[in-house]
Amino acid sequence: MRRVHVAVLFAGICVAVGSCGVGDSADSQTQDGDVAADFSDSKAGGGGNGATDVSSEVSETNGGAPLQCQPTTDTPVFQQHIAPILAEKCAVCHAATPVGGAPMPLLTYGDTQQTLPGTSDVPVYWAIADAVANKTMPPPGKPELTDDERDLVIRWAEGCAPEGAGEPVVNPENPSKVEVPPPPADATVTEVRAGGYAVPLAEDTYQCFAKKLSFSGEKHIVRFEVDVENPEVVHHIVLLADVDNNSPAEQFDCKAMPAGSTFMYAWAPGGQPLQFPPDMGHPLRDGDTLVLQVHYNNGKKKPGIVDHSGVRLFLTEPRPKEVGMVATGPLQFTIPKLSETKVSSRCTMPQDTLFIAGMPHMHQTGSAFLQVAERLDSSVEVVVSLDKWSFDNQPFYHTPLLLKKGESLVTSCTFLNPSSQPVVSGEGTKDEMCFHFMYHTPPLDTRFCDENMDGGPSVDYEVGSCSSGIPMTDPPTVGGGIRLLSETQWTDMDTPLPNGVYVLDGWDMMLNQVSTVAGTVDLEKSEFVAAGYLIRDTHSTTVDILFNGFLYTKEGASIEFGGRVNESGEFTANEKNQLVPISPCADASLPLIWMTYGTTDTQAATSFFVDVPGQPFDLLFRGRWVVLGPR
């Protein structure tokens, strides 16, 4: 068994060999292309069975000396064995004019014999073998080499990379493409383009270009098509719908998608037009704002590049069937520090639904993506399975799938967080997402489809660190109602709260607003539970409440949040007669801003006003208490 080892010369070899990251899927029939042409049982796959285990070192550098190789009688040759692999698996980026930031062509035997850029004596074929052996190339989402292909490339490099005789088995200038029909004859075209953008001399630049559309009535998008003006530096292109009109300008830096936006289309080298079936179209209305996000890779630092690349949208009058976009997957989650974490959510069909194409989406800590369909007969069908993930490799996949009412999609993402800080879900580049943006018909009435898979909310109470004197027994878990603060009848509590130990017996939660980053809170559907104690002394008060639950939005998202309010010490009254903590012991994930307490006609009561980190709303929590004993 063998292990290709090219010493320190090939640290970061994926940059040296190629940085083109998005393109054909493992099954070329499933990515982009004519989704109208074939509703066969094809599946998108980005993983593989892995390389042959190679355990002995084939070569090393020695103080910069040339690498050594040893021809054998069974060494593969370029023309017969290697050229077909490069044509099928590499030429989409490493073309005669490399695209997407790839630094060199890999089409001819002469290309493989060049010296690797940045070295004085290392041939490109060694870099190819190293990248193939270590699975850094082809990048995630590209067609992987089989074990036999990987073995051929490694043995070819070990044997000094002979050319062999004859013509290549496959013409490397013309890698195979998915057949795409011509645009509909009745379509008109509108474009979203980079408006003469001066490409910086840098490897990674993300630039957005917004366009507000103007036309009469409603149109249907029936085809997306990319026009790349400078393929040597355009790494990938994403078209977004700015649903909430949050784009700050016509042109802006945007590695993260604008808040409130959804994906419409994505392209990278090798990608092809996306065309809907003849009776389907995606609605586009007068005044809609589209955002073109372009990732530029000018690693060669070529000066003077001005780019006008963009996306053409082919529009027709409304077709019989409307296509919608829905984001399946969990909206809210946390990835603990130094961890591997898997998150999932379910999307149950309220109607028979046909899914046409989809784009999985995660950020930098994503490592794997899986979506399965759960059928009514309890069978499970894989829709998309990506064993490797790259932030720069997010194409659309052809996912023809008809789900009946009551059947479900389960979307799962695996994250590797090497940081000493937790990563939270969100739209920032340092946050994470787990979505599958899916075209479907008839449209669901939600932008998100995110159902909690863990059952109802629950709390596992443990005494807080600031809670000396709390009984060592578990308090009961109690539910309560969720209301809007402005619509709540308020009763002042002006009777002093007697000293004593109290256990939570009921509560009401009031939000100062129902607008969140994921939509409008559905107060009737949302659910929470809580448990806790309160101790009142002459000179101090201890509060220890743990709660958890789900806010469900009318747009189909679920937001799980909860936390602990645990403070102990003295409180002072402010100008509104609210009690504010004075440097107390605090062990709270939800900071206590102020509290009031007293008695009603029937029992003790308190109100707590807390800040909810990461959310635009504040929370007023009114607890009802039963006294356990004196203090």
Image (tube, rainbow, N blue to C red):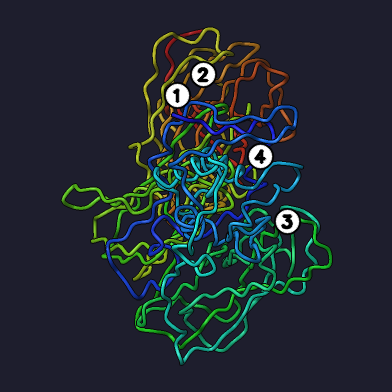
In the rendered structure, which amino acid carries the disc numbered 3?
Thr
- Foreground disc of the pair 2, 3: 3
- Residue 242 or 35: which is nearer the viewer? 35
> In whole angstroms, how far apart are the C-alphas of marks 2 and 3?
54 Å
> In whole angstroms, how far apart are the C-alphas of marks 4 and 1?
61 Å
Residue that protrudes farthest toward the right in the picture: 304
- Residue 381 or 104: which is nearer the viewer? 104
Q: Which residue is mark 3?
A: 205
Secondary structure state at the residue bearing disc 1:
strand
- Foreground disc of the pair 3, 1: 3
> In whole angstroms, how far apart are the C-alphas of marks 3 and 4?
19 Å
The x and y percentages for residue 118 are: 76, 44
- Foreground disc of the pair 2, 4: 4
Is residue 415 in view from this perspective? yes
Secondary structure state at the residue bearing disc 3:
strand
3 or 1: tag closer to the N-terminus = 3
In the rendered structure, which amino acid carries the disc numbered 1?
Trp
Residue drawn at the location 38% of the way across and 35% of the way down: 457
Residue 625: which disc?
Answer: 1
Secondary structure state at the residue bearing disc 2:
strand
2 or 3: tag closer to the N-terminus = 3
